Amino acid sequence: MTVEGRTWAGTTLTDRRATRHRQLLDAGLDLLGAEGSGAVSVRAVCRRARLTERYFYENFGDRDEFILAVYESVVAEAHLALVDAVGTAASDTATRAEAAVTAFVSLIIDDPRKGHVLLLAPLADPALTRRGVERIPMFAELVRDQLSATVDEGDRAMTATALVGGLANLFTAYLGGGLDVSRERLVAHCVRLVLGADALHS
């Protein structure tokens, strides 16, 4: 049996490492999502996770690598929520659009920490700025797949990218308190934007 597979107090080394990794990411979500980029340091993360720095460096090379991992964790959750919402919705475009928007809004509002990490942190932390730009195509592809297949591929790509940018700014303003509207009104407006995208090509 390998060292990783041996049990101690009922858990394997692999399990304990996975648990510590999750503890660190959760601590990072708390700090970055609730207190901002300036609150994230190796010492602060370890204090919040109740782990020593040894375990931090067992998982991450430095603070920037860690903060990128926190961001990517939220990105992956958001992407999965959108894919699941579209995949389980009815086949008509309106229902899929409403399901996707509702799922995303639920993610960033029900747990505002995730909204801040996903949308606001890349604006403030140099370690995330480039990665935030790099992740735009991944979300634009989801939007593009919902646009009419009869439209030129180049136009679909431009419309999807513009729509993702516009929605991101809208959600950012909402999270930052710049939009005094209800959650229901926000969702309805975003759905109208998504459904109106095809009209740009008519």
Image (cartoon, grey):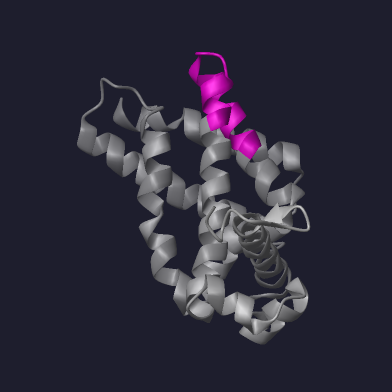
Q: Position of residue 115 (x, y in %)?
A: 64, 56
Please identify the quarter of the rendering in which residue 27 is found: bottom right
Residue at horizontal 58%, vertical 46%?
77
Q: Position of residue 46 (x, y in %)?
A: 70, 79
Q: Is residue 97 visible?
A: no
From the viewer's perspective, is 49 left or right of 136? right
Q: Nearer the viewer, residue 145 or 14?
A: 14
Looking at the image, which residue sits at the far top? 91
Residue at horizontal 41%, vertical 27%?
146
Q: Position of residue 197 (x, y in %)?
A: 41, 33
Q: Nearer the viewer, residue 2 or 83?
A: 2
Q: Is residue 39 above or below residue 81?
A: below
From the viewer's perspective, is 156 left or right of 52? left
Inspect the magenta stretch and tell me whether residue 114 lies in it: no
Looking at the figure, which quarter contains the C terminus?
top left
Q: Is residue 63 visible?
A: yes
Residue at horizontal 29%, vertical 43%?
158
Q: Nearer the viewer, residue 64 or 79?
A: 64
Q: Nearer the viewer, residue 103 or 60?
A: 60
The magenta-colored residue range is: 84-103
Q: Position of residue 193 (x, y in %)?
A: 51, 36
Please identify the quarter of the rendering in which residue 40 is found: bottom right
Q: Give the main secondary structure, helix, strand or loop, of the magenta stretch.
A: helix
Please identify the quarter of the rendering in which residue 134 is found: bottom left
Residue at horizontal 44%, vertical 52%?
165
**Count of marks overlaid on the render:** 0
